[in-house]
Image (tube, helix red, strand yellow):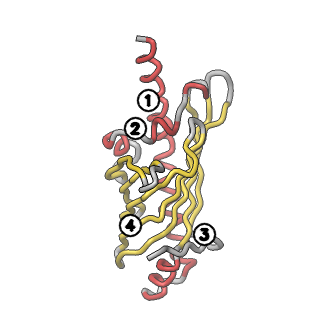
Amino acid sequence: MSDIIISDKQLSSSAYSAVINLPIEQVDIAEWLFNLPEAEYQRCCPPDHISAGSTTTDDGTRMSINVEMIGKTLMVQHYVAEVATPSLCRMVSTSDAFTPNGRTRVQVIWTRSVKKIDDTTCEYTNSVVAHPTQEFLDFIAEHGTPFEEAAEARQRDGGDHNGRETPLFAASIERRARARQQARAA
């Protein structure tokens, strides 16, 4: 079954930024993401982050699989890389959402980017946008939940989660970049 994404409806959108104390040339978001140890992922938003790993689609496109709690919903994210460069990763997932009312699916677009502040720092931005699938709209209708109520809950819970993980992701990216620099210097 193919998921129908309702791209003209938005469940949530949030973007937070944090400073990385390194020149932008030393930062590689894609390298960090696709080599992120599970324990480091868990440290980036405890207790919400449960598990993470990297794999590929059948055609070889890189993927990041993340399992996390967003509010009361267990999310299994299947992020496929649309862009994966040192300064920009745009990942798209049709994610499984295990809610207190049952299982459904939503689309999540996760964009991570860095931009130069000056010669010694850059700004990391973590952006998350969620769209419903038709399955999700049918699911909330079955449970008598108006779309606006579902979107308000997702905005609240997703925004809270993103606000907590962003500075921890930035610190993790910085640590990874520093370790890579030290390894090259050795």
Q: Is residue 169 left or right of residue 100?
A: right
Q: Amino acid at mark 4?
A: Thr
The answer to whether the residue labelled 1 contacts the one labelled 2, judged by CB atoms less than 8 Å apart, is yes
Where is mark 1, residue-wise?
176
Q: Earlier along the polypeptide chain: callout 3 or callout 2?
A: 3
Q: Secondary structure at mark 3?
A: loop
- Is residue 5 visible to us here? yes
Q: Is residue 79 above or below residue 96?
A: above
Q: For the residues marked 3 and 4, what is the alpha-carbon distance in whole angstroms?
A: 17 Å
In x, y percent, where is residue 15?
59, 51
In x, y percent, where is residue 177?
48, 27
Q: For the residues marked 1 and 3, what is the alpha-carbon distance in whole angstroms?
A: 33 Å
Q: Earlier along the polypeptide chain: callout 1 or callout 2?
A: 2
Where is mark 2, residue-wise?
35
Most foreground residue, 140 or 54: 54
Q: Amino acid at mark 3?
A: Gln
Q: Is residue 109 left or right of residue 70?
A: right
Where is mark 4, residue-wise?
73
Q: For the residues marked 4 and 2, what is the alpha-carbon distance in whole angstroms?
A: 26 Å
Neighbor class of circle 3 (other Cα within 10 Å; few <14, some 14-19, many 20+) is some
